[in-house]
Structures are given as structure tokens and as C-alpha cells.
Image (spheres, grey):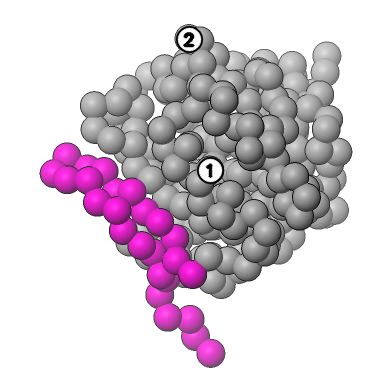
Amino acid sequence: MGTADARVRRRRDLILSPQKGSRVTEAPNIDKSAIRDAATVIVLRDRDHRPSVLMGQRGAKAAFMPNKFVFPGGAVDVEDATVPFAAPLSAVCTSRLIDDSPLDRAAALAAAAIRELWEETGQILGQPGVWDAPPDNWRDFAAHGHLPNAAPLQFVFRAITPPGRPRRFDARFFLLDADELASDPDDFSAASDELVHLQWIELDKVRAFDLPFITEVVLAEVAARAADLNPPASVPFFRNNDEESLFLRLYGRPLSD
């Protein structure tokens, strides 16, 4: 059985027979209407010439954004807060992630971004390293001999799903240069079946695809930053709650000298 098939079967078995250390995010007693922390990865390729982004299509029966072309990403798992990094997030990104968020959330968000990128595309953002008893939902990643590498991730956008949707997420979007991948960017053989039609789409052609509104907004930010390797001066934040919708900017907390 291939790696992707094994991962799908393991995730199915964990849902049916949850054990210690297993994923619990799909358990029937979880309130799926509650806002959940999530991470999304925008992988940008050939940014100096004809920049393109890695996207896939969600299934027609998906509860959240069916049939839409999206970036790889998903909800944070409890175990994501415990994984070791080969290199951590930059201080700037960490500072902005904890702006208007719990202090302990940054590392888990970065880990979730790397895990979801691996699960949905088979791409590895990591460095060679040895794990000590990886969590169940990280075993396939660990089996490739890499520790997650958060250093190349740039926090560039945040948005909360508006009220009334079947799923609501507090999503943090991370920009990643494809040159930082430890895997072949054209090899999707290890991907799960959560996204289909995985492909690199040129930025000037991506709007021809069926995109969620928030993805179009994020793509405009990405296009403006395609040739800039530095972190943005501030991070846009669409905060949608039951009272109001606000467009804010996250500047981060003061960094220590």
C-alpha cells in the first residue's frame, strides 16, 4: 500500500477507534460550529519570473467550500503544539501571530501549516532530523527523516470565517517560497485525497478558477509581494464575529533587544 493510502486508512481508523495520541478533531462530540484555529500555506514558485501558487480543488461533498480551488491547509490539532522544530518561526512572525491571540498559539499554527501541507500535497517543509516518538498524525512525515522547519514561513494574512457558515475557522495564512521545500515540488504522489487536481497555477491566470472570496483577497496580497522576500510591514486581519466585521492590521508586539 502506498504512503498516501496508508495515511488515509490511519486517519479513518483513528476516527473510528480513537486512542491515546490520536487525532480527535473529527470526533462526533466536537462543536463544528465553533471557531477553530487553522493554518494555510501559500507556496509561491518562480517568483522572480512567472510566479505561480500551489492549489488544489476541494471535493464536491466537502462541508466547507465544496468544489473550490484552495491553498493547502486545515485545523490545528492538539498534537501540533508538541512537535519539535528543526528551526522555529522568526521572531517577527511569532510576534504578529500572538497579536490578538493566546501567547502559546504561534508554534502550533506553524506546525499545523507544515503538517497540512504534507498531508494534502505530499510536500515536505523540513530538515533532516530524528524524532522521539512522533504523534500519530505526524508519523508519516517523521518517517521521511525530517523535522518540521518553520523558519521559512512568513505570516501574511489572517481571517475568521463569517457567522452562519457550516464550519468556522480563525485561519492564519503563511507564505512559503517553493525553494525551501525538501521535496520535489512536482511530485504529489504522497498526497492524501483531501485535495484533487493539485497543480501550480500562474498568478496571472488563477482568477479563472473557482475561488473562495477570501482566497481572492489573499491572492491580491501575494501578488503584491511576489518579488519581495521580506516580511510585510503589517498583517491584514479580517475579524468577523457575531457583532461586526472589521478589517484590522497586526503589527506584532515589541521585540526584545
Q: Residues within 10 Å of mark 1 (few under 14, many from 20)?
A: some
Left/right placement of residue 28 relative to residue 50 reads: left
Q: Amino acid at mark 2?
A: Lys
Task: Pick whichever, 186 or 83, lies toward us.
Answer: 186
Q: Nearer the viewer, residue 217 or 127?
A: 217
Q: Residue at x 83, y 30 (%)?
A: 187
- Could you say where residue 28 lies in the image, as x and y percent from the top left? 38, 19
**3D distance between C-alphas at marks 1 and 2:** 25 Å
Dot placed on the residue nearer the N-terminal end, 1 or 2: 2
Residue 192 seen from this side:
yes
Q: Eyeballing the image, is 104 above or below 70? A: below
Q: Is residue 84 visible?
A: no
Considering only vertical position in the picture, is 190 above or below 225? Answer: above
> Which range is magenta?
233-257
Q: Position of residue 26 (x, y in %)?
A: 45, 24
Disc 1 marks which amino acid?
Answer: Leu
Look at the picture and state if 70 lies above or below 103.
above
- Report if the CB atoms under discs 1 and 2 are less than 8 Å apart: no
Q: Position of residue 10 (x, y in %)?
A: 66, 21
Residue underneath mark 1: 219
For image coordinates 63% across by 32% down, the residue present is: 205
Q: Look at 51% across and 22% down and name the residue there.
A: 210
Does 246 appear in magenta?
Answer: yes
Toward the front, the furthest residue is 204
Of all residues shown, which one is farthest toward the left? Answer: 243
Mark 1 vs mark 2, foreground winner is 1
Name the residue carrying label 2: 61
Q: Secondary structure at mark 2?
A: loop
Q: Nearer the viewer, residue 131 or 216?
A: 216
Which image quarter holds the N terminus? Answer: top right
Seen from the viewer's position, the closer of residues 96 and 44 is 44
| Position of residue 27 in the picture relative to residue 155 (left or right) | left
